[in-house]
């Protein structure tokens, strides 16, 4: 049964914005049109072979076609530009706004996307019961009264997550009447105070996730596109040739709903922008990201595990969603042998002739363990590939598809004010960004022990990072530095030997304040840390992030399992009283050249 939502509308808020702009520029207020009108303009343009489809400015509001999982679908489009300058797309169902699939050389400009009702809500903490483990939230005027259970407790002054408080899972929501949502969560009840702000996400009804999804496509450009809310992630792209460009896009909170007196706390329920495995990674440039519910931006990758070998034929199961394609190169480790994929077939698992002992491992694998793969479920096929030589790898070997990792990404000249991570699992560049109050810039494959990791190069340069690691301490995470390049072993709670990363360059960054260490690096062949300025670290007592891995959060630079490290021309200005020593070489660092000497202003 659907929840009954408020009668007020975001359309009025958008109209107010447009009217103010129209007064200033002596242009008429925008028209309000149906979502069907938007679909018709796009579909007619595609059907007629137009190379430039212009959507008249205005508000387009409505739900998806009956039985469809998205409000707008663009499939198989080639060599077109969709001009949506001054266009607001307001979705009235929680399901996805736009799906783009099997497209190539498509550009969308200017589009603004929002939801009415919002797929999350917010309010004030009005009662707390630590003993029974619940918090009562009075929903703000104008925001939807829904049983959204994922809670964040926010500081009223900063409107950010409260400092040094946990990221909370497994909470439950209960509608109590009179605009009160009771959240059953012992962690939240342990520190929430009456008068705090709270955001509530994770509505929980079946939806097709994400606001704008780009699947199995090539060279899609989003120019000046804005996402103001999302049922999960804002923009997601994976599969295909990739090489997309996200230019001057925004994933930020939209205008307050009609009747609201409080600004929005969230922009998305989960990540702002996520890019997955593809042939070439995404250029994200000049974008603004604020107040995401989880990570700010990420590039994801994955591996395949060998289930059976017959000469040059391998039966594989992907860990995630993708599969190798003909011509792809596969490899088990950095600098190891490489084979070319010559043929690819998908076969039902029960018809693949897999040995009973391997099937048993697959079927009984627990979450987050090596054998927990996509083909754990019998209705997910395995992938049979022929390679360019006889396999040197045994059954149970994890492989990386060198050509499906999202390598070659560039995240540059963006502004980020969001408490989540910049999360990196591929080879590429993060440069010239301004990042305020993040978890961190984190490179970490986040795969189980034994899964393959092949990241040949990573450059993190000329970024300004302020006040990192002030939120969500995680003792079980190995991502403890403001810049953190690590590769953990989830069984030993140590770090993988040098070879997860090839060459890592961290240069020209300014790191100001923050909680704990400033730079952590592990598991690399070669590391250059050059020309960075680290200003006023260790002024506050570090939290326990990285504690399960015995990482020293009182160091400025912490190193482990690296063949060669060079420290060149870095400045350490005014370290605080919680620093024990500037550089800690924890274990298995073969050669360390250079030092870090504290200076005073």
Image (cartoon, helix red, strand yellow):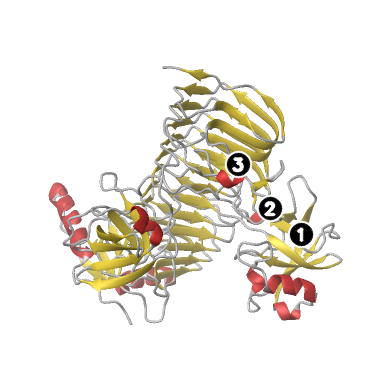
Query: In the rendered image, is residue 267 in sight?
Result: no
Q: Give x and y (percent) for residue 281.
A: 56, 50
Q: Which residue is mark 1?
A: 397
Q: Which residue is mark 2?
A: 402
Q: Secondary structure at mark 3?
A: loop
* Structural crowding at the residue carrying mark 2, measured as other residues with C-alpha within 10 Å and reported as few (<14), some (14–19) or many (≥20): many
Q: Give x and y (percent) for residue 101.
A: 50, 66
Disc 2 versus disc 3: nearer the observer: 3
The label on residue 371 is: none
Location of residue 9 by image quarter:
bottom left
Location of residue 89 by image quarter:
bottom left
- Specify whether 487 is left or right of 411: right
Q: Secondary structure at mark 1?
A: loop
Query: In which quadrant will I find the N terminus?
Result: bottom left
**Position above or below: 310 against 86:** below
Asked if marks 3 and 1 touch (Cβ < 8 Å), the reply is no
Report the residue at 59% width, 50% height from top.
Answer: 425
Which mark sits nearer the N-terminus, 2 or 1?
Answer: 1
Q: Secondary structure at mark 2?
A: helix
Q: Spatial distance from mark 2 to mark 3, Cα to Cα?
A: 32 Å
Which mark sits nearer the N-terminus, 2 or 3?
Answer: 2
Report the residue at 44% width, 39% height from top.
Answer: 468
Asked if marks 2 and 3 touch (Cβ < 8 Å), the reply is no
The label on residue 550 is: 3
Q: Spatial distance from mark 2 to mark 1, Cα to Cα?
A: 16 Å
- Specify whether 363 is left or right of 109: right
* Structural crowding at the residue carrying mark 1, measured as other residues with C-alpha within 10 Å and reported as few (<14), some (14–19) or many (≥20): some
């Amino acid at each position: 049964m659907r929840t009954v939502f408020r009668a007020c509308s975001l359309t009025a808020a958008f109209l107010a914005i447009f009217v103010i702009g129209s007064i200033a520029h002596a242009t008429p207020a925008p028209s309000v049109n149906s979502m069907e009108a938007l679909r018709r303009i796009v579909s007619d343009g595609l059907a007629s072979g137009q190379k430039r489809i212009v959507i008249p400015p205005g508000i387009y509001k409505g739900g998806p076609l009956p039985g469809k999982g998205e409000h707008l679908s663009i499939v198989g489009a080639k060599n077109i530009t969709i001009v949506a300058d001054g266009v607001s797309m307001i979705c009235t169902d929680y399901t996805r706004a736009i799906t783009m699939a099997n497209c190539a050389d498509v550009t969308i400009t200017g589009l603004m996307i929002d939801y009415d009702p919002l797929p999350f809500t917010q309010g004030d903490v009005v009662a707390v019961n630590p003993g029974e483990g619940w918090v009562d939230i009075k929903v703000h005027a104008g925001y939807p009264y829904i049983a959204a259970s994922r809670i964040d407790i926010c500081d009223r002054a900063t409107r950010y997550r409260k400092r040094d408080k946990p990221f909370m899972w497994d909470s439950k929501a209960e509608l109590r009447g009179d605009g009160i949502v009771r959240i059953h969560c012992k962690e939240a009840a342990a520190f929430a105070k009456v008068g705090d702000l709270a955001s509530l996400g994770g509505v929980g009804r079946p939806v097709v996730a994400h606001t704008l999804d780009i699947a199995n496509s090539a060279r899609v450009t989003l120019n000046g596109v804005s996402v103001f809310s999302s049922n999960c992630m804002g923009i997601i792209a994976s599969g295909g040739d990739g090489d997309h460009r996200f230019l001057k896009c925004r994933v930020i909170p939209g205008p307050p709903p009609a009747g609201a007196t409080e600004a929005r706390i969230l922009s998305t329920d989960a990540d702002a922008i996520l890019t997955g495995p593809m042939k070439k990674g995404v250029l994200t440039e000049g974008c603004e990201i604020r107040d995401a519910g989880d990570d700010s931006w990420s590039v994801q990758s994955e591996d395949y595990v060998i289930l059976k070998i017959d000469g040059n034929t391998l039966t594989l199961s992907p860990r995630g969603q993708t599969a190798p394609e003909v011509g792809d190169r596969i490899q088990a480790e950095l600098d190891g042998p490489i084979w070319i994929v010559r043929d690819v077939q998908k076969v039902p698992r029960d018809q693949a002739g897999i040995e009973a002992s391997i099937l048993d491992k697959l079927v009984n694998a627990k979450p987050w363990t090596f054998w927990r793969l996509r083909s754990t479920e019998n209705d997910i096929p395995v992938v049979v590939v022929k390679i360019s030589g006889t396999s040197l790898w045994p059954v149970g070997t994890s492989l990386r598809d060198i050509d499906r990792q999202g390598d070659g990404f560039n995240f540059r000249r963006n502004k980020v004010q969001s408490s989540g991570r910049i999360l990196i699992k591929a080879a590429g560049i993060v440069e010239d960004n301004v990042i305020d109050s993040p978890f961190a810039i984190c490179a970490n494959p986040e795969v189980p022990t034994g899964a393959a990791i092949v990241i040949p190069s990573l450059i993190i340069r000329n970024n300004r990072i302020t006040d990192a690691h002030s939120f969500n301490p995680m003792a079980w995470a190995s991502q403890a530095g403001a810049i953190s390049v690590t590769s953990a072993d989830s069984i030993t709670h140590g770090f993988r030997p040098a070879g997860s990363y090839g060459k890592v360059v961290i240069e020209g960054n300014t790191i100001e304040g923050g909680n704990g260490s400033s730079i952590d690096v592990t598991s690399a062949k070669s590391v250059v840390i050059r020309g960075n300025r680290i200003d006023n670290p260790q002024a506050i007592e570090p939290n326990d992030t990285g504690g399960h891995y015995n990482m020293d959060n009182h160091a400025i630079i912490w190193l482990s399992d690296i063949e060669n490290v060079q420290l060149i021309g870095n400045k350490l200005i005014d370290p605080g009283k919680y620093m024990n020593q500037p550089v800690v070489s924890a274990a298995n660092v073969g050669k360390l050249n250079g030092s870090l000497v504290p200076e005073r202003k």
